[in-house]
Amino acid sequence: MAAPSEEDAQEFLLMTIALQVFVSGLAAGGVYGLFAAGHTLIYRLTGMVNFAFGDLVGLGVFATLLVLSGTAPVTQSGAHEPRFMGALVVGLVFCVSAGILTYVGLVQPYLARGSTIGWVAGTAAVAFAIRAAIGAAFQRSSYVFPDPLPFHRVGNSGFIRIAGAQVQARAFFVIGLALALALGSAWLLEKSRFGQALRAVADDAEGARVVGVPVDLLIAIAFGLVGALAMIAAIAAAPGEAVNASTGTLLGLKGLVAALAVRFGPPLLAFGAGLLLGVVESAIANVHLGSWQLGPSYREVLPLAFVLLLIAAWPSRAALEEQE
Amino acid sequence: MNAFAQTGGELRRAVEEARAEWSRGASVVVAAVLLVALVPFLSLPGVRLDSLADTVYLAVAATGLGLTVGAAGLPSLGAGAFMAVGAFTSSLLVARSGWPLEPAVLAGAAAALVAGLISGGVVRLRRAFVAVGTWLLAWLVWLFLLAFPSVSGGSQGLILPPKTLLGLDATPTVHFEVALALLALTALAIAAVRRGAPGLELSALRQSPRLATSLGVRLARRRLGAFAASAFVAGLAGALSVQLAAVADPAAYDPFLSFKLLVAVLLGGAAATLGPAAGVAALGLIGLVSDPLARVLQLPLERFDTAVAATLLVFVLALGGGGIVPWLEPYLARLRRQPGTRLGPHYAFDREAAAGPVLKAVELRKSFGGVVALDGVSFELARGEIVALVGPNGSGKTTALRLISGAEPPDAGRVLFEGRELTAEPTPERVRLGVARTLQATAYFPELTALESVLVGRSVRRRFGGAVRTALQTPNARGEAVESEAKAREALAFVGLADLVHVGTPQLTTSQRRLVALASALASEPDLLLVDELAAGAGSDELERLAEVVTRIRERGIAVLLVEHNLRLVRRAADRVLVLAAGRAVAEGSVAEVADSEVVRQAYLGTQRL
């Protein structure tokens, strides 16, 4: 048998890297996607952008961590399932109720008054306050999230080989879960009475109010639920990487970037944009064409700059100020 | 020699004016600034000059942000990003290229200005998107600094060598005096801009962008000016404060810095020029109490500060969002002199009367989706002629008006004004050329007086009303301000509201607001006035008055195009009537001729007679 030529080997290496990039990108993107879908749903319901979205989810994630293992550093494994489920429920309760409180206390009053600066400053205040509170309780620069599912037992201590590529087994779980959550909630939005009412509010909030839809209650619940969905995905992905007080903030930011890239289009489209953003980030960090490589430094900066340029130079009609 | 004499005369005049307008409040402010300037020489116990100077630099940046947040009403979450751009540009120039301080600081401010102009595209957007764009900017700059240690010096930051500032060793005392002088200059310039034409236009844009742009105010240009000026000031403050700190530390430019600046603006009061500086001072004072508290509670200091700032903001918002300075206003008002009424000379404005029709609309077409709103309509208006566009709902009247005013582009056809092709010109340019328009009576500026509303309409005729000239209060700018006010008063007198110049628009009746709208449009000295549904919901007395005003407008040689449902007003005022039905002109002629037309009766389904 002839030894594989150098060219073949290189092509094989390229394929391997591409696969790794793609799978890990999709896993990160699945989480971004749920944040993006949440942002776009809230925008379509209210015309506002929740700057505290990421931090509200971060609050839930760290509440879960607090119940699981306190503020001490933890090892990768060692979370027992019943305790984990309990902690997750506590985290979800925190995340959902904080979301609802934010809407009721700091968003709805200002939306009703037509005061943009009110809800902008209000949600930004919540964002920074939560980040400060998490940072005060968890003072190390990063934490490892305990893993309830024994992924480290799959394959080679958590990594499986596909076509020569080393891929985290967790990645497939995260991708599957994110897809299931996105498609499931899209289906609910389409079919359930709650979903239909939400769509009515998004179409014409005043009209819905007139025919007796409890608009504010629905939006408040939606505010909490989008947080819960994003939080489940974030927790599923959390053990893969170190987390700190800014983790939630950055996830919210990336969700916003993805939602803006599709101009707050339908939630499923925003989810797709999130997936794409994950793959793009991963590609920017890892892919090199010949000797030319962007590298990890550009991973977060480039998509952000692109979207900022997009809204500044080519805004959608809906985003433009009303002019004669 | 002549130029010297002229300059001397101007200066003397300026001094006289300043003396005439001097008030006790101004004396108090000057005394306070001088007193604060003495602080470094008093060797007060427990006062750290470097942190005090740093606070004053922050106040400079916040004062600049006040222009964007207060005057323009744009919720910026990215002011800190411009401080970072100024800080790192100047630091790199000083630390790596060995530049002296002064040019490096100016280059830093210039870089921030450029960053402001580039990201300034967001000012054309609705406020929610301005917030989103500036939020992204704050994160972008911070993530960039974290990701590129080669630029930011990484976790150590860039160490800056000691330098001289304005020929003196850059000690905290020198920085403090420079910062204070900068604060005073910034506040003076911004106060002048806010009181002048640019401030009025920004305020009009904030209250009703639609009405303001219909009067010819250029939204993107004005807002970009405010946004970029804020960026420049923030860059300047950032570049200087980083030299004071002697190290450019990326961690100091977390997006929280932007948020802190916004908190300072809202805490002190965005509506007042000195509000943001007062907000920074308040945050500093609160820090004096909260920092020891944080130490007692063993909490990380910067986390505690964040929580305190966020909580404060929530309180300010809950109390109505006014802030400290506006809340103190009633007490300060006693120190202030009531504004006297200044009346300038009367300026006549004669325009060369051109031959031929003022307006020619040629084969205008417009459809929305599949619905044809206007299907090839042509008509002309002569100087001093009143033409009414009438027709049932959906016949295309308002669409025709919008195509002529430039609110929408036609699908086909042309608009010629005094022989000049207007079809591609945007609304403000058309107003400048002499095509004014009123919106329906529901649109008005809730925070302006009648006179100020009319001055917004006058703004297109100003040549020296730019931000720079206004900030410097050049003789031309001041002369023109007097002239504008005279013109605006004249326009108000023309519509019969001479007694109501200082009354707030919300206190006016609907019928008075219609007249203010007419006066605003007239203040731009148009040759063609487009009037949209002037009489909607008007009573019969009111109708008489409106008809009388419209007729007198014609006597000034202005052509008037009325889009009108109220056929009584049409009969009273119009020389000629053009009847539209389903996007086509179905009849044209005098009121009497059209009234007898069978086509017209059919168009109205025979329900209404002229």
Image: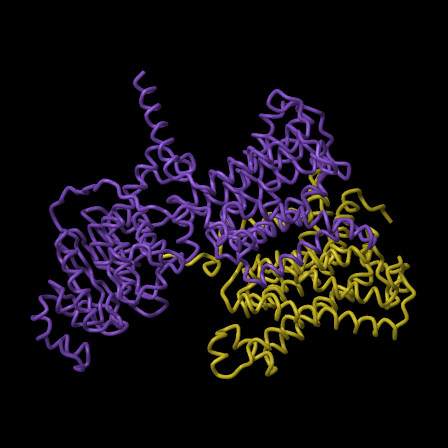
Chain colours: A yellow, B purple
Of residue A226 and residue B473, the one placed in the foreground of this image is B473
In this rendering, position of residue A208 left or right of residue B426 = right
Return the residue found at the far top: B1
In this rendering, position of residue B267 left or right of residue B388 = right
Residue at 30% in and 18% down: B2
Report how many numbered discs are placed on residues in the image: 0
Residue at 37% in and 63% down: B506
The quadrant where residue B253 appears: top right
The quadrant where residue B499 appears: bottom left
Residue B254 in picture, x, y percent from top left? 68, 47
Q: Is residue B291 visible?
A: yes
Residue B605 in picture, x, y percent from top left? 19, 81
In this rendering, position of residue B315 left or right of residue A207 = right
Q: Is residue B413 visible?
A: no
Residue at 14% in and 64% down: B573
Residue at 28% in and 54% down: B520
Residue B327 in picture, x, y percent from top left? 53, 55
Q: Quadrant of the C terminus of chain B?
A: bottom left
Of residue A317 and residue B8, the one placed in the foreground of this image is B8
Asked if residue A264 is positioned above or below residue B466 in the image, the reply reads below
In this rendering, position of residue A188 left or right of residue B383 = right
Asked if residue B224 is positioned above or below residue A129 in the image, the reply reads above
Q: Quadrant of the N terminus of chain B?
A: top left
Of residue B196 and residue A248, the one placed in the foreground of this image is B196
Residue A53 in picture, x, y percent from top left? 66, 63
Of residue A35 and residue B314, the one placed in the foreground of this image is B314
